[in-house]
Amino acid sequence: MPRFGVSLRPKAGADPAAEARLAESLGFDLVTVMDHLPGERPSLETWTHLTWAAAATERILVAPNVLGLPYRNPAVTAKMAETLHRLSGGRFVLGLGAGGSNSEFQAFGLPVRSPKEKIDALEEAVDIIKALWTGEPVTREGAYYSVVNAQISPPPDTPIPLWLGTYGPRALRLTGRTADGWLPSYRYAPPDRWIGMRDAVRKAAEEAGRNPDDIEFAYNLGFRIDEKAEGQPGVLVGSANQVAHELSALANRGVTFFVMWALGDAEEQWELLAKEVVPAVPH
């Protein structure tokens, strides 16, 4: 039974509170915000954006999609996550990625790492974050991140889901061993590759003694419900029935949570999605 979320517009001038309330009123389960901070395009900072959305809603989950690891120290991220999770009544999901946009990190004077280094750093970060969430003192000495007798208080009073946006073999194994969810994007994990990547996550979970069925298999998808619109790479375009058919096929392949990115008028697209597409996807 797949759940549905939508991505909020990150642009400055948008109203995160109004958009999040609309998404909640339409019955969606999650709102997310992407994490691309530099650039000349006017935009909002991700964590502040999410906090504003969470404060304006009561039921819907909130998540970064996904945090670029080099932007924030993992120990600080662990504390930030606990606070937002607590203040939102347990509605925060920590989406985390190794960081794909090298030019962005270079622009901000942050580390630019090789693919191997990115996954090594992500593994260290996940270990530190999860250890700090226990509330116990943590000491780690890593190549990228270290903490000495670090502790956060209070610890989370309910578990904070950790979803990783990962693609390569090592990163997928890390996801299966450690994460509560996998959040790839259609563009980088198209359906013909998605199944094999999902199976790699599941296998790693089983090898780690975890139940792979406990992992959320989410999927970022661009969409536009418009019979006259031209198709675009990596985007579901067509009538409500056509989009519902494509989503149903993906659900049958194992997607458990769709995170939808609207092209065109977001409010209009969300309403069509909620009223004409979601009810037609088998639940």
Image (cartoon, rainbow, N blue to C red):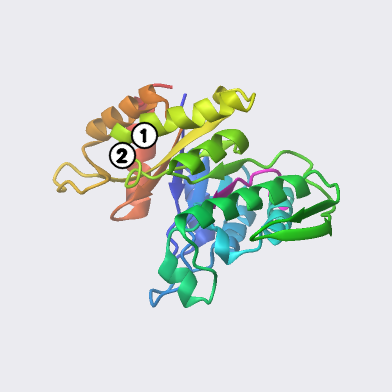
In the image, residue 182 lies at what x, y percent?
A: 50, 38
In front here: 195 or 11?
Answer: 195
Say if 105 sits above or below 240 in the image.
below
For the image, the number of numbered tags is 2
Give the residue at x 55% y 33%. 176
List x then y, in percent, for residue 218.
Answer: 46, 37
- Magenta span has 91? yes
Query: Where residue 190 sits in the image (x, y, percent)?
Result: 31, 39
Query: Which amino acid type is marked by label 2?
Result: Pro
Instruction: Work out how far the residue at label 1 is from the one at label 2, CA to CA, in angstroms.
Output: 6 Å
Vertical side of 15 occupied by 282: above or below: above
For the point 69% across and 43% down, the residue is 90
Mark seen at residue 175: none
Instruction: Tell me the kind of residue under disc 1.
Output: Trp
Res 16 visible: yes
Q: Secondary structure at mark 1?
A: helix
Which of the 4 image quarters holds residue 194? top left
Q: Residues within 10 Å of mark 2 (few under 14, many from 20)?
A: some
What stretch of residues is rendered in magenta?
Answer: 87-96
In terms of secondary structure, what is the magenta stretch mainly? loop
User: Which residue is denoted by mark 2 in the rendering?
Assistant: 190
Q: Quadrant of residue 259?
A: top left
Q: Quadrant of residue 280?
A: top left
Query: Quick one: 106 or 30, which is closer to the camera?
Result: 106
User: From the viewer's perspective, is 212 left or right of 184?
Assistant: right
Residue 260 in percent (x, y) is at 39, 44
Q: Are marks 1 and 2 in contact (CB under 8 Å)?
A: yes
Q: According to the image, label 1 marks what residue? A: 194
- Considering depth in this image, is 114 or 93 the residue closer to the camera? 114
Q: Is residue 256 visible?
A: no
User: Residue visible at 34% across and 46% down?
Assistant: 188
Q: Quadrant of the C terminus?
A: top left
